[in-house]
Amino acid sequence: MAEAFHEEEVLGKAYDSRLMRRLLTYLRPYWRVVVLALIAIFFYGLLQAVPPYLMKVEVDRYLDPTHHAQIPKFLAGFLSPNPMVGIMQIALALFLPSAVLTFLLEFGQDFAMQFVGQKVMYDLRKQIFGHLQRLELSFYDRNPVGRLVTRVTTDVDVMNDLFASGVVAIFGDIFTLLSIVAIMLKVNWALALLTFSVLPVIVLVTMWFRKAVRESYRRIRVAIARINAYLQEHLSGVAVLQLFNHEDRSYREFEAINRVHMEAYKDSILAYGLFFPAVEFLGVAAVAIILYYGGLRSLGGAVTVGTAIAFIQYSQRFFRPIQDLSDKYNILQAAMASAERIFKLLDAPVTIADPEKPQTLPRYEAPALATAAAGVASDDGRLAGDGHAAGNGHAQGHGDGVLTGARIEFRQVGFAYDGVHRVVEDVNFTIEPGETVAVVGHTGAGKTTLTSLLLRYYEVQQGAILLDGIDIRQLRLADLRRNFGLVLQDSFLFSGTIASNVRLGLTPGMKPISDDEVREAARQVNALPFIENLPAAFDEPVKERGVTLSVGQKQLLCFARALAYHPRVLILDEATSSIDPQTEYLIREALRRMLENRTALVIAHRLSTIQNASKIVVMHKGRVREIGTHQELLDRRGLYFKLYQLQYKDQEIKTGSRE
């Protein structure tokens, strides 16, 4: 079952200096904030050693002065010989300089690093999303969406933990430990060594803890990725699951994946549950040793009562950073695993990119959409007005600009998705400006692949595709794709409004599409009546994937989107194959206006929809087998004739040239 869910690979090691150096580069824009946090952490660590020492001074000087303990000169000069006054001075020193400063320093460093962590998360997510948008479609063929969502969400969240409470906070624990160790050795090295005697056991416990948590954490990461991938796939296809009564089986499969995640977390909880009490137990053992040995030494006069009390407090403060460091280690190794996955994604090469020295197509300003005042559609679908005839591949539009079709040439084009088995091979044909060319053939013949290559979703591996005589690989992607409007069989709408879905693109002059243009585009594709019947018309909310709209309505909106974009070339990939006859009639009427003076490439299974095409390209097993008009291909009685017979076998075929 693991293979079915695109199992997440387990990569990397607990700590990788190369990854850490790369991660630290994300702190560079915020280095001033990080430096301030480090300064705050440094002084915070030093202050942790102050309260126990003040307690020692108070006990030895005022509460048990019989031992005549030595105190630093600056304190001796500052403190009053009067016990009442001296105790108040120590209490004020403990509260004001120590407690207040500790509060301010801890708040400052925590706020600063949380700020930096959020900034780094923001930057990382922008970088990942921007990179994902530039990757070719073959990358998404290999990587499930759920895994990519995990990268942008969960893995980036781990980076926030690293920067907010990991990489810099580690220094705080180290400073605290060093200051406590230094003052313990200075006050009484013998008691200090007794306190440190439990450290070897703590090291062994910590090594076990790190190993257990690292393994459980990696299992958790794998399980989360599988859960995301499974949810994305099965929630997107929930209608199919319900149709085939697959709910129970899907529930059991998800339960199995979810159980793996739970078991991994249970192991992690067990490790945490054993480690922290173990460190606490060893800390209490150290206190017991200090109480016993320090008490005996105090009775003999070798150790003051204040020193023994201070060491008890120091031992408690000494083991707390050790616990924190172990927890920080887990954050660190979690970040290494997430960073490895994030950087593997960011390092995925962008194989389809702008050329170093791009060529440019002749600039054109798209004309405004013709309105009823400027030109009306005649019975044959041609625009009348402005004194220009339609259908010649070059017409003056209403407004500032001339809309012309584009010349497209497929020259010995070959391509294989896996790099080995060719899907299209030696494809040669030309689409002249203003022509409507249809591509037909059996399923798997390579029809849709041609449109993907034309738009550079995939890169041509053999031959070339030319747009107005220029190899499309020599054009900027934005310049290339700005010339095309695409309508697919499966209409895709984004969450937003009707208007935002129609004005998804920009006009060729990179101008936003106006409200008037949105309305006119909807009118010309016969979508305006149903839009105006919606409660909020063009402001009607569109939910995810347009679930509140019918298939035909979504298709009409996609046609309006393509028209509002002012494309020179219109690509229709089975655009009318899944809609009702009435909607198809509306779309056909709209198409007659949309195709005016545009080059069109139509992928179709229904041969009735492309009989009026300028020419028809018949593909079979990735190769072009026939090219001609509808009537010419029927007269040849070749592959197109057989396809036509399959669709109309119960009708008499009139070719106009029969034997």
Image (cartoon, grey):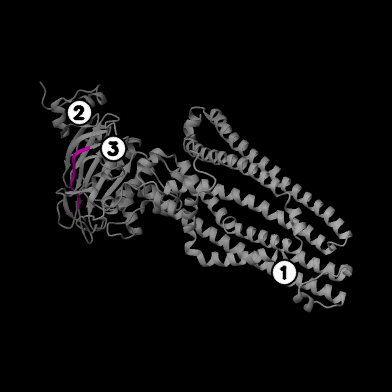
Q: Position of residue 601 (x, y in %)?
A: 23, 41
User: Does 42 sit above or below residue 604?
Assistant: below
Q: Which residue is mark 2?
A: 640
Q: Are marks 3 and 1 in contact (CB under 8 Å)?
A: no
Residue occupied by mark 3:
449
- Check if residue 149 falls in the magenta segment: no
* Most foreground residue, 198 or 424: 198
Mark 3 and mark 1 lie on one chain; the one further toward the N terminus is: 1
Looking at the image, can residue 625 be seen? yes
Q: Quadrant of the C terminus?
A: top left
Q: Name which residue lies at 70% across and 59% down.
A: 181
Label 3 or label 1, whichever lies nearer to me, is: 1
| Picture quadrant where residue 507 is located | bottom left
| Cα distance in 3D space between marks 3 and 2 | 20 Å
- In this orientation, which residue lies closer to the viewer: 337 or 631? 337
What secondary structure is the magenta-colored segment mainly?
Answer: strand
* Start-end of magenta stretch: 404-413
Q: CA distance from mark 3 to mark 1?
A: 71 Å
In-image side of 133 versus 371 (left or right): right
Q: Find numbered disc 2 in the image and state the secondary structure of the residue it sits on.
A: helix
